[in-house]
Amino acid sequence: MKPHTLLVSFVLLLALYSLPGCKDKCKGVNCPPNGQCDPETGDCIIDFCATANCGAHGTCNPANGVCNCDTGYQGANCDTTWSTKFVHAAGWSASDNTTASTAGTPLGIFTYVPTITATAPATVRVNGMSGFANSQINFSLTSPTAFTCNQTDAAGRVYTGSGSITGDTLTVNYTVTYTDATNDVITGKWRKN
């Protein structure tokens, strides 16, 4: 082969090698776990959701691999219901304070022992609300720690209010409106037994 032919061949090979797509841009690129090299750019593309386990009640956020849980669920794998922390097998000790009354109820503190059961991931039922044995009221959980209530019990008493839970303490603020349109305004602290 003539020297100038060899030189032309070398220049052509060099030109071809420098064309886009001809270089191995992933050569020597070490991507982290869940990463894959993009052959066009040589950049590592991370699949944050490759190892995420969001269970049946969550979806993985591809930007960071964190599970976004459905309403009523929490935890790294979206496998814990909000209602779980409200249920306590040994029951609760309620200390309610009637702060205002048009029903003639004496103002001050009264105590009773309600029970709470979970009826859905974001709903719990309180049995014995305000110390009335036949009173069953649902608390609709609006977050893992907060709730609202707006329900009429079997005796026609209407309960409206809200509250929150912190650790073993449930704070409640509600109004009981009776069938004669009188009411009691109540604040309370409930503690797990």
Image (cartoon, rainbow, N blue to C red):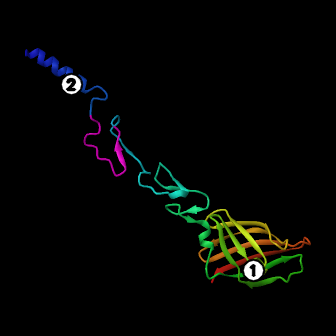
Q: Residue at x 72, y 65 (%)?
A: 148
Magenta stretch, residue numbers = 24-38
Mark 2 falls on what kind of element? helix
Viewer-closest of 170 and 152 = 152
Viewer-closest of 133 and 52 = 133
Residue 83 lies in the magenta-colored region: no
Q: Where does the C terminus fall, quadrant-wise?
A: bottom right
To which residue does mark 1 refer? 96
Q: Is residue 112 above or below residue 26?
A: below
Measured Cα–Cα span from mark 1 to mark 2: 86 Å
Image location of residue 55, percent across then percent down = 50, 58
- Does residue 94 appear left or right of residue 78 in this picture? right
To which residue does mark 2 refer? 14
Q: Residue at x 24, y 23 (%)?
A: 16
Image location of residue 115, percent across then percent down = 68, 78
Image location of residue 13, percent across then percent down = 20, 23
Q: Is residue 165 above or below residue 41?
A: below
Image location of residue 35, percent across then percent down = 36, 47
